[in-house]
Amino acid sequence: MSSSIYQNKVNSLSKEIQRLEAKRADFSKQIAAKKKSAATLSSSLKNAKGSSLTSKLNQINKLENDAANLEGKRAEVEKQISRKQVDLNNANTSLQKELAKEAKKQQEEVQRSQKRIQDNYNKQIRKLQQELTSKVAAQTKLISQNEMIKQDDIQYDVFISHASEDKETFVKPFVDELKKLDEGLRNSRFGIVVISNDFIRKYWTNHELDGLFNLEESGVSRILPIWHNITKAEVVRFSPSLSAKMALSTAVMTPEEIAIQVKEILK
């Protein structure tokens, strides 16, 4: 049964017990009155004689009988109260059990509802994360493709391998001259190597030169050496194959003259 049925039963039994207790109280009041009247009459028997005495004795007897009858009724009411109290205690116990059962059921429903809400929230979060991941991946791919396109669009006319010590004395002014002749260099790809004693001593410049030789062997690039403050004998000792290539020399030409010559070679 539901808790409301037990609650109604508890309320009904409580009212019934209150009614019986009021009835018991009324019986107790009547019994007390009867006994008081009988006691008053008993105290007056000393002065009574003849018919007066008989009358008073009869009255006392009747009052005592009435009080006894009332006590019997009161006793019956008290039994009813006891039975009703047992029923009330049982009803209260059943009510508490049903209330606990309903509270547990309600708590379980709340937990299920919270779980549904949490699961739906987690589902939405996962969906948003997946969408965000997809968008980031798409954007990253697009950026990567754009970067590749940009890289593919970049073309260099020449790559100048040189030692840093030669930058100010020759390479920088030479590059400035090449920039002035930029239009004449757009359709050519050369590896210009500024050979000097500083160049020969450095690891990275030698590494760059090896890379240019590898490209030349595959037909991708050509090497154009420029000798700077170095003799042919020193170049031969460094690289016989490089010394055999046609070279320009800063010993007999200015950076401007070498740039003009490079332009002619690259046409």
Image (cartoon, rainbow, N blue to C red):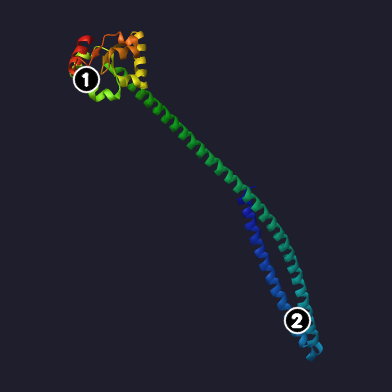
Task: Name the residue located 75 percent from the left edge and 83 percent from the top edge.
Answer: 39
Q: Which mark is residue 221?
A: none
**155 vs 55, nearest the viewer:** 155
Asked whether residue 220 is in view, the answer is: no
Query: What amino acid does circle 2 point to?
Result: Ala
Decide if residue 99 is on the left or right side of residue 244. Answer: right
- Is 250 located above or below residue 244 in the figure? below
Quarter of the rendering containing residue 220: top left
Residue 220 vs 141, above or below: the answer is: above
Q: Position of residue 125 (x, y in %)?
A: 46, 35
Residue 249 location, quadrant: top left
Q: Earlier in the sequence, mark 2 or mark 1?
A: 2
Residue at the image point whose x is 41% and y is 31% from the top: 132
Q: Quadrant of residue 236?
A: top left
Label disc, if present, on residue 174 of the rendered structure: 1
Q: In this view of the protein, which residue sits in the foreground, 194 or 264?
A: 194
Where residue 217 appears, x then y in whole percent? Answer: 36, 8
Amino acid type at circle 1 is: Phe
Q: Which mark is residue 38?
A: 2
Q: 10 Å neighbourhood of mark 1: few (<14), some, or many (≥20)?
A: some
Q: Quadrant of the C terminus?
A: top left
Q: Where 164 falls versus 81 (above or below)? A: above
- Residue 242 place in picture, x, y as percent: 32, 11
Q: Residue 70 or 231: which is nearer the viewer? A: 231
Camera sees residue 67: yes
Q: In screen coordinates, is 7 left or right of 160?
A: right
Q: Residues within 10 Å of mark 2 (few under 14, many from 20)?
A: many
Front of the two marks 2 and 1: 1
For the point 18% across and 17% down, the residue is: 256
Task: Tell me whether circle 2 and circle 1 mark residues in contact (CB < 8 Å).
Answer: no
Q: Secondary structure at mark 2?
A: helix
Q: Secondary structure at mark 1?
A: helix
